[in-house]
Image (cartoon, coloured by chain):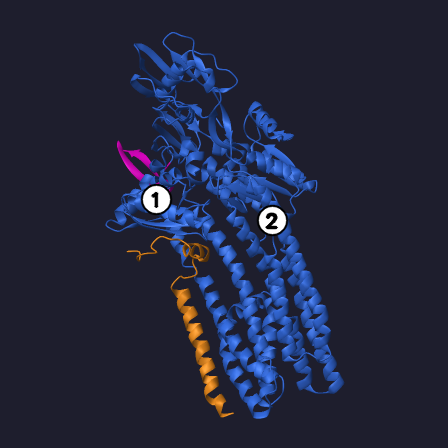
Amino acid sequence: MTAAMRPSISACPACVAAPGAQALAEQALHKDAQIALSLPTIHCSACISTVEKTLTAVPGVKSARVNLTLRRATVEADPAIMPDQLVKVLEGVGYEAHELDAGTLSVTQNDRAGRDLLMRMAVAGFAMMNVMLLSVAVWSGATDATRDLFHWISAAIALPTLAFSGVPFYKSAWAALWARRLNMDVPIVLALALALVTSLWETALSGHHAYFDATVALVFFLLTGRYLDHRTRAIARSAAQELSALEVPRAIALRDGAEVQLPVAELRIGDMILVRPGGRMPVDGVIADGRSEIDRSLLTGETLPVFAEPGRAVSAGEVNLTGPLTIRATAVGRDTSLHRMADLVAIAESGRSRYTSLADSAAKLYAPGVHILSALSFLGWYLYSWDVRTALNIAAAVLIITCPCALGLAVPAVTTAASGRLFRKGMLIKDATALERLAQVDTVVFDKTGTLTAGTPELTNLAAHDKGEAAIALALAEMSSHPLAVSLANAARAAGITPAEVADLTEVPGYGTQGTWQGQRVRLGRAAWTGATPGAETAAWLAIGEQAPRAFTFTDRLRPGAANAVQHLMRQGKRVILISGDTEPVVAALATRLGIAEWQADALPADKAARIAELQAEGHHVLMVGDGLNDTAALTAADVSISPASALDAARVASDIVLLGSDLEPIGDALTTAQSAIRRIKENFRIATWYNIIAVPVAVIGLATPLVAALAMSISSITVSLNALRLK
Amino acid sequence: MAVLSYLIPISLLLGGVGLVAFLYTVRSNQYDDPEGDARRILNTDWDDRPKP
């Protein structure tokens, strides 16, 4: 669908992808290529089988497997099969698809860290069950030698388990102490160590209470929280990386009269570079030869292609539409306008205040509190009984009881549930704190081109033309891959018009197409070329012989769900602002169409960022939705930002949330989901606090037996998890 | 109490078998697509003969 949304780029994605793909194919000759596709809209078992059947029916495809959890399909196919071919096939059966970069995928697929955590969690879980079994025997009355035996067996299971499963905590606690800070893991490790030492001591002295079960259970619950947290972030990270496959890695340069393919990094100033239709400018330059039209929407937000002829300056990132161009490079690498934009982002980034997550602020309060409490109870009991063993036992009990099982699960359980919900709606949360920031948003700033509008023109006055004219226009339009022509052709075909018989069809790059119809010259293209006077509206003109040219007018098509999303946000009482780099009449028209009262046109990238900073200075929390390079600075400056999957790489990197589908509607839901997620997190904190308020005094006065500790710990962890699942 | 001398090893062994089985499922990527697998089981394709 990315393809369909930006026909200019995708009119020939193969051209963009071809150099790299060819090189890849040559390397992997006789080896099946793996193609990965993102399928944001699949949701049911029928979808799975339709997609798999459709893909395997394509000649050359060996096998196809859909992963519903990741909304992704992996295809084994001949190297000759191009991903965009499969994307088209899937769009034919009604599924949106994007190509994913298989190279970056394979790196993230072997999620070592995640698997490692899962193993440690499994070991802790199984050890916990076994130790619990033995402990139940002790709690139900095993005495003397039997109790000691059970304690020793528990110790024999718990010690190796803790040595293996506890590693993540030891590492993180050590790192924190090394940096002279306290984090949540320091009290955890202290509790584990203290509980182990006192339990071993008690067991050796044939005592009644040992905390082996509690220590293992603690590690298990905490690892569960950590694993959930990791998985949410790993899925988001991998998918976000996969989306970055659009950039041009190579360019065709003319050196000594021959065409050579070079990595963009090796281009020098003064090089002559060939850019084919559908290709992206790799460097800033001046057109030396050729006529065409270029699409600047990603850089400036302008919807309409600009006419290009020798002598005109072009910037890196612009897309060549109709004819081949030769450009002379004037700036390469870091000096190109593309990179200067990226630098703007870096500046905005350094200015972004570091957001402290709820969990971090809770840990900051919590860690010192626990240590002080435990030390005080040790001191109190020691002074009271002059018995180190009792005092140490109680200090260990306090540490174990207060240990942040519920706290460690409170945030990850909710964020997992929330990001899972949003993922199913087609939104990818890239940043861990994005949900929290999203919940505070009261102002939403939209970009126009590519965000609220699809960047695709839509024919408005087909009915105003008679069948004959439309048939000629269709015949001419089908010759060209210009966005207006493509849109005209699609609309005419959909209306059931068949192309007229036009001979000698030729495309004149930069102007339009012409041919001969019943002995008359017919032209479809720019106003001046067809002999018309250009009006205010976007139009392609049809001239038949010497008759007055007729205009086919276009408007920018709204992205699906745009109107609903804006209305939804307004109903929620959010302030909605439209800021665009496009011209005033176009922006004004769109604002009226969507009912947006506040809008600003002709905004430069810096203006957008400045406007957002202004809003923030007024105390607003701003959500920025944008897709272009001209938005990246604003995306970084905003409190939280969303970009569509069709956005430019830099924009996706700068934003916290990526919309996987082409539909904008989920944005409204995202805000509500974020708000209810934050409510749940706060409830969970409240549950954990209440639990501590009740349990801590019990531990401090020395009434906490291992049974009480085990019960309290399990109940609080389960309550918190269930509360997270309540997320609607 | 003699019963403990074989019941405890048996319970530990069973726990170990469970652990090994779990580790096997992790290593053979059986948790890669829980949502899809849950739906696939209801799918009627290949009900009559195994997928070639």
Q: Is residue A255 magenta?
A: yes
Percent position of residue A86, x then y = 35, 42
Q: What label sits on residue A453 in the rendered view?
A: none
Percent position of residue A184, x then y = 61, 66
Mark 2 surroundings within 10 Å by alpha-carbon count, few (fewer than 14), some (14 through 19), many (20 or more): many
Mark 1 — on which chain does it sit? A
Query: Observer-nearest residue: A516 or A369?
Result: A516
Whether residue A640 sits left or right of residue A69 in the image: it is right
Region of the chain picked out in magenta, as a range: A250-268
- Count how many numbered circles sit on residues in the image: 2
Residue at the (52%, 63%) spot, across then down: A227
Residue at the (54%, 65%) spot, across then down: A224
Tag 1: amino acid: Thr
Q: Closer to the observer: label 2 or label 1?
A: 1
SS category of the residue bearing label 2: helix
Percent position of residue A328, x then y = 37, 30
